[in-house]
Amino acid sequence: MSNFTIVNHPLVQHKLSIMRNKNTGAKDFRELLSEITTLMGYEITRDFPMEEIEIETPMQKMKAKFISGKKVAIVPILRAGLGMVDGLVSLLPVAKIGHIGLYRDEQTHKPVVYYCKLPQDIEERLVIVVDPMLATGGSSCDAIQMLKERGCNNIRLLCLVAAPEGVRAVQKEHPDVDIYTAALDEKLNENCYILPGLGDAGDRLFGTK
Ligand code: PRP
Ligand code: URA
């Protein structure tokens, strides 16, 4: 079974609480999502392998620690996942970025694919799938499946708010994928929105309705 991590850091929790408030506007929502993603990026990269390479400080030579050639791809699920890209790129500036476009059908709540563009060597990379909302889990499961069909076997999922239903779905369909979230909420409503949640993440990010 994969790891399931709730990033409980006070800065993350404080910023998430501001995002949840319905009176928080798109500008603040965007900035907070980006800041939280950077903070969570610290956790998701915690186990990156290190190597020692000799350098010279102004004082003397030393063996200094560097991240050991980890090739990373960041894959946002459109649209809302776009709001998490910059926050991770600020930590991982040479990561490549793929895009998977999925929207939930309003009646069935099942994801529909409309776009997929991935780095050519995606199967050689650690792939971090980003999407703020893990509700039924359908979108994340399908995105992960698309990546696996292209040979990816090292995938992590970074979200902001998860419902128990979504976590269970990803753990069942993709037990090898580690999940990181800032919050595990109570449940889904009849329209498969997360309660208490933060509403429609894409609409709040981009000011649409
Ligand atoms: C939202 C969200 C996730 C998905 C989560 O996207 O950003 O991708 O729903 O729901 P699920 O876990 O039940 O699949 P939405 O389909 O609203 O598209 P958008 O980001 O373009 O608004
Ligand atoms: N998508 C969202 O944006 N919010 C939810 O609560 C569920 C799915």
Image (cartoon, rainbow, N blue to C red):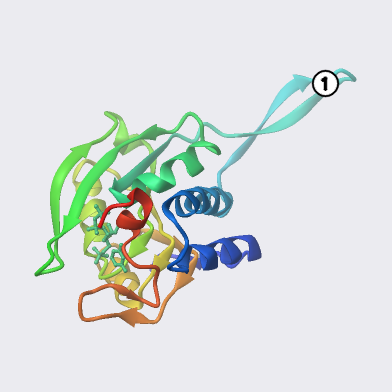
Residue 147 can be seen in this image: yes
Q: Which quadrant contains ligand 1?
A: bottom left
Q: Quadrant of residue 173?
A: bottom left
Quadrant of the frame with the C terminus: bottom left
Q: Amino acid at mark 1?
A: Thr
Q: Is residue 126 left or right of residue 113?
A: right
Label 1 crowd (10 A; few <14 / some 14-19 / many >=20): few
Q: Toward the viewer: 25 or 64?
A: 25
Residue at image x 29%, y 31%?
119
Q: Is residue 143 left or right of residue 130?
A: left
Q: Is residue 28 left or right of residue 169?
A: right
Residue 93 place in picture, x, y as percent: 51, 31
Q: Quadrant of residue 58?
A: top right
Residue 106 place in picture, x, y as percent: 13, 65
Residue at image x 27%, y 53%?
208
Quadrant of the frame with the N terminus: bottom left
Q: Is residue 9 above or below residue 99?
A: below
Residue 154 can be seen in this image: no
Which residue is outermost to the left?
A: 107
Residue 170 place in picture, x, y as percent: 30, 66
The residue beneath circle 1 is: 57
Q: Quadrant of residue 203?
A: bottom left
Residue 196 place in picture, x, y as percent: 40, 77
Residue at image x 23%, y 59%?
139
Q: Is residue 195 above or below residue 3?
A: below
